[in-house]
Image (cartoon, rainbow, N blue to C red):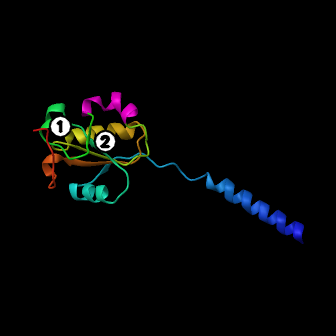
Amino acid sequence: MKKTTAISLLISLLVLVGCAGNEPAPQAEYRKIDAVQAKEMMAAGEPYVLLDTRTDEEFSEMRIEGALLIPEYEIKERAEAELPDKQALILVYCRSGRRSAIAAYALVDMGYVNVYDFGGIIDWPYDTVSDS
């Protein structure tokens, strides 16, 4: 009886261990949200990267505090070095939403799985900072 129970437990354990590694990998997909949703995600306490995809000049004039600047036209060259964690939550914005969408799609194409485009800073109703 003890041997049968031990074998049953061993088989159950092997089944559980074998199934644990079979979870599907997160799928990379483009996600569009608005400024309110982005602000809520930022306030939730989970780590995130706030990615500004505008130019150096625009970034200096006005940005959301804590943003990392990688202009949209440099995403493909710089993302892997500056955003090494492809599982990280990345919140992307630009001026009006066009460049953030291009950058977000590029990140998704590169395998980033947690990318959210919240459009333009012109629609950001919260505080911003500048270099001046």
Q: Which residues are magenta?
A: 71-82
Q: Residue at left 45%, top 48%?
A: 27
Determine whether label 1 and label 2 are within 8 Å by CB.
no
Q: Residue at left 16%, top 44%?
A: 96
- The relative height of residue 75 versus residue 87 in the rendered view (above or below) is above
Which residue reaches farthest left?
A: 132
Q: Secondary structure at mark 2?
A: helix
- Neighbour tally class for label 1: few under 14, some 14-19, many 20 plus, Cα within 10 Å: many
Of the pair 93 and 102, the residue shown nearer to us: 93
Q: Which mark is residue 88?
A: none
Main structural element of the magenta stretch: helix, strand or loop?
helix
Q: Residue at left 88%, top 70%?
A: 2
128 left or right, relative to 14: left
Q: Position of residue 37 (x, y in %)?
A: 26, 58
Does 76 appear in magenta?
Answer: yes
Which residue reaches farthest bottom?
A: 1
Residue under numbered circle 1: 59
Q: Amino acid at mark 2?
A: Ala
Q: Position of residue 124 (x, y in %)?
A: 16, 52
Q: Position of residue 116 (x, y in %)?
A: 31, 49
Q: Secondary structure at mark 1?
A: helix
Of the pair 130 and 105, the residue shown nearer to us: 130
Q: Residue at left 25%, top 56%?
A: 39
Residue 7 image-quadrant placement? bottom right
Q: Amino acid at mark 1?
A: Phe
- Quadrant in the picture for the N terminus: bottom right
- Neighbour tally class for label 2: few under 14, some 14-19, many 20 plus, Cα within 10 Å: many
Which residue reaches farthest top?
A: 77
Q: Nearer the viewer, mark 1 or mark 2?
A: 1
Q: Position of residue 47 (x, y in %)?
A: 37, 51
> How far apart, in angstroms, are the residues tagged by discs 1 and 2?
18 Å
Residue under numbered circle 2: 104
